[in-house]
Image (spheres, rainbow, N blue to C red):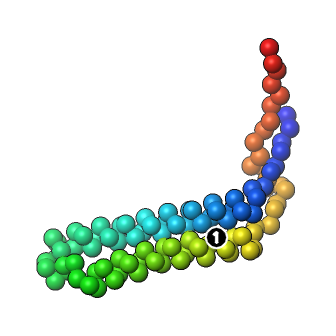
Amino acid sequence: MHMLPIPPSREADARNRMSRTFWQGLLIDVVVAVVFSVGPMLVGSDFAFTGYYWVTIGTLTAKTVVAAVVSYFARKLVPPEFDPSRAAKEATPITPTTVT
């Protein structure tokens, strides 16, 4: 059985990191937005949809986009070192197939 440790390209690795960072940040933003949406029902009208509410939601969303972009460029400019021993453990085994 042959093992082929093929590291992802720098571009693919950076896109993957950016995507994960974006979705993680967006999940936090959605949770905060849900809390803000339920807040007026639980606390009262003082928690209503004011300008501060929308500024906070906008700021959280902008933070997510900026974090994803920074993550992309950070990973692209400073990729992780390729570790052959780790790659060998994570490699997908190649099994020969026969054509009948």
- Residue 59: x, y in percent? 41, 81
Q: Amino acid at mark 1?
A: Tyr
From the image, tell me which residue sits under label 1. 72
Q: How many marks?
A: 1
Quadrant location of the N terminus?
A: top right
Q: Secondary structure at mark 1?
A: helix
Quadrant location of the C terminus?
A: top right
Q: Residue 85, relative to residue 46: is it above or below?
A: above
- Residue 40: x, y in percent? 18, 74
Could you say which quadrant of the image residue 99 lies in?
A: top right
- Residue 28: x, y in percent? 42, 69
- Using a 10 Å C-alpha cutoff, classify the residue at mark 1 as few (fewer than 14 neighbours), some (14 to 19) or many (20 or more): many
Q: Nearer the viewer, residue 15 or 98?
A: 15
Residue located at (82% from left, 60% from top): 83
Q: Is residue 100 left or right of residue 12?
A: right
Could you say which quadrant of the image residue 46 lies in?
A: bottom left
Residue located at (68% from left, 75% from top): 74
User: Which residue is situated farthest in the top direction here?
Assistant: 100
Q: Nearer the viewer, residue 32 or 76?
A: 76
Residue located at (60% from left, 66% from top): 18
Could you say which quadrant of the image residue 29 lies in?
A: bottom left
